[in-house]
Amino acid sequence: MTVLDVCWIDRQYDRGSATAGSGRFVEHVRRNAGEFDDCWGDISPVRFACTVWRLATVPRLDPGYVRFHRRILSAECARNEWDGSLLARVQVAGPVPEALSRSRVWTQDRGWRGWPTTFGQFLAPSQRELSRFPHVRPVLLVDAPLPLEQLPPVPDAPPPDLPELAERTVGVLVRELDGLLAPMVSACEQ
């Protein structure tokens, strides 16, 4: 099975669309530096990583600095309230479960439809489509811990290199998420 890229940083678009030449994401982090105020001096990099992720993805930066495979409907990072660890919460457009694929009896010839796609992107059905046909759109909900070891430490005060620290952090998160999700999404594409 070929493993696909599921999560990546779009540096080419980021640099080509910047107004000051340093990159859209760098400019976005500078403009939103106040969002990191409660992160400084924290022994854990989780709060900082979650803030960086929010700033690097849609809807905060559109198109996002981080891009996703067409099956990824949403991906967020959150603090696990139980132990303070870093948690990934991802929604993946999945295939129809095998139990439903084996038998079409459940459809009762009602014209069931799956995920509508446009240019390969998985979409929610329009109100018009919903008024005419029933839809079944399987979504895989992924909640998974992400390791903290590779994340850079958070300084005690806002550093002058905040954008570079944010870029390093998002790079680690992208690498971890891609490694976690690529085998699953590749299997869904088979």
Image (spheres, rainbow, N blue to C red):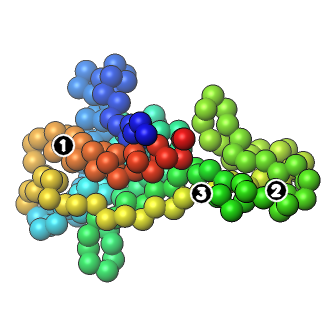
Left or right, 186 with reference to 170: right
The percent coordinates of residue 162 (x first, y second) are: 16, 44
User: Considering only order in the chain, which callout, 3 or 2, is on the residue closer to the N terminus?
Assistant: 2
Q: Looking at the picture, which amino acid does disc 1 mark?
A: Arg
Residue 83 appears anywhere in the view: yes
User: Label 3 near label 2: C-beta < 8 Å?
Assistant: no
Q: How dense is the environment of label 1, judged by Cα within 10 Å: few (below 14), some, or many (20 and up)?
A: some
Left or right, 152 with reference to 114: left
**Element on which disc 2 rests:** loop
User: Label 3 near label 1: C-beta < 8 Å?
Assistant: no
Any mark on residue 139, and which?
3
The percent coordinates of residue 38 (x first, y second) are: 23, 64
Say which residue label 1 marks.
168
Task: Please determine whether, in this image, residue 88 is positioned above or below residue 119.
Answer: below
Q: Mark 2 or mark 1, which is nearer to you?
A: 2
Q: CA distance from mark 1 to mark 3?
A: 31 Å
Q: Looking at the picture, which amino acid does disc 2 mark?
A: Arg
Q: CA distance from mark 2 to mark 3?
A: 20 Å
